[in-house]
Image (cartoon, helix red, strand yellow):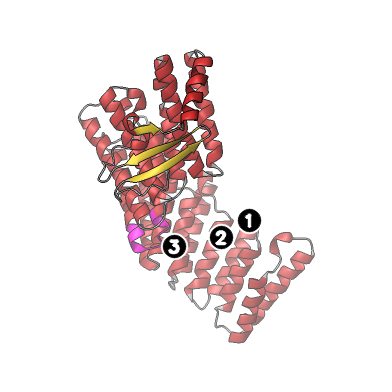
Amino acid sequence: LGSALIGRGISFVRVHSPSRCHHIRILENQSPRCLSAIDDSTYHSDPSADDEDHYHASVTANPVKPRTERGIRSLTYVMVKDVEELMKRNASAASEMALDNIHRLKRLHNETGNEAYRSSAKPLYNSLVRAFAKSGTPENAHLAEMTYYEMKLKAETTGDEHLLPDATTACAVVDGYARSGGKSGPLNAERFLFKLMDDAEAATKAGVSQEQIVLPTSASANGVIKAWAGRNSREGAARAQGILDRMEYLQSSAEGGGRSICPTAYSYATVISAWNHGDRGIEAAERGEAILETLIKVSSQAETTQGSGGRFEQDIVRPNTVVWNSVIDGYANSRHPTAGTRALGLLKRMQQLSNDGNAEVAPDAVTYRSVINAFANSGHINAAKSAERVMDMAATEGITIDTRTYNTVLKAWSCCSLPGSASRANEILKSMIDAHNAGNEDVGPDVYSWSTVASSFAKS
């Protein structure tokens, strides 16, 4: 199905199943709101004469056994699980199975007249959307969106609210575009996400009940933020920031889903990381720190107003270790002369908050290594000594010192212009060897360790 060439005249897609082969006709200039592959009027079986006789004979000889509503739900559950399992191995085959399941449920409904079959169809449609999305291709991501609109159109035209797409459907479409790669992937994911946000706002203002509104979720928005952050460009960072800003607005407003779309610590950390890698420099690092300070202020205000018309406890987003580490990493990437000092200042604030009882911001190995890297990249004349002091500080705090941490300190000494820098790097290498020989498997020197020390002597 994913091999359909949409928009190029009339295309035919062959969907194979054990007992039949269907030809699905996709017309030129067809509205993206209609997926003919799941439309009864254009879903044609084309079996051979023998297959046709066998099919009718089997139906006559083996009439469909009546099922209870619970039995029908169990059937659809098994169908969905089969698709999910196949999806792990072959997303294209999974979409064919999902489509076949939908056709099977329609046939059972037509033969029995049991409306429970119709009302149980949404999980099958959602499994089709997820299968399309999982394939990771732009074409199948488009088919996922088409299926979403087909569900919506069927629900509106037939009055069958059981088919209305939900957050699961919407998240799968966003995920499909986000994972499809290229510039068009994040663009389409953002377009669809913002349309969900706009529709939710408009529907809420119009007084539509929340049950009938497809509310975007934090997970779907975070998926788009991640897609843009992965671009490692200034544009990607700016677009990730724009999505975060929109999430904050919707959370604070009465419309648009509110709590369903609230930013998470992951949202902030990913946006900060996007700026770090999209616009390396001191300005990007300062922007990340500004986001952190805003988050600290907002969470503090939310805690003050909690219980008196403020946010619920679960809605308060507090900056955790990951968010702080992202800001420190920004300074490490900036290569600014003051980067090490500023990163160390953030580390000390984390230590103070942790000592005051805030375990969510306790510095970890990544924190200390990022501060060391900030010193190593700063070019400051005393950076190597400062980097080594931070490593000693980490050891005092009970943080495991591994080869990566030692290598970052070695890098700092390799970049140092002070006399004796190469000798000091060599001493650290020897301490690594001694510790490893004594049984510490975490600090064995690797190729980078040896080459960095050799580079230190070459520069001296």
Position of residue 198 in the picture relative to residue 440 (left or right): left
Q: CA distance from mark 2 to mark 1?
A: 9 Å
Q: Earlier in the sequence, mark 3 or mark 1?
A: 3
Which residue in the structure is indicated by mark 1? 399
Examine the structure image and report whether residue 217 is included in the region drawn in magenta.
Answer: no
Amino acid type of the residue that numbered disc 1 sits on in the rendered structure: Ile
Residue 29 horizontal/vertical position (percent)? 25, 45
Q: Earlier in the sequence, mark 2 or mark 1?
A: 2
Task: Name the residue furthest left.
Answer: 206
Q: Which segment did they paint magenta?
A: 228-238
Task: Name the residue furthest right.
Answer: 438
Which residue in the structure is indicated by mark 3? 330
Q: CA distance from mark 3 to mark 1?
A: 22 Å
Residue 439 horizontal/vertical position (percent)? 78, 61
Amino acid type of the residue that numbered disc 3 sits on in the rendered structure: Gly
Which residue in the structure is indicated by mark 2? 368
Q: CA distance from mark 2 to mark 3?
A: 14 Å
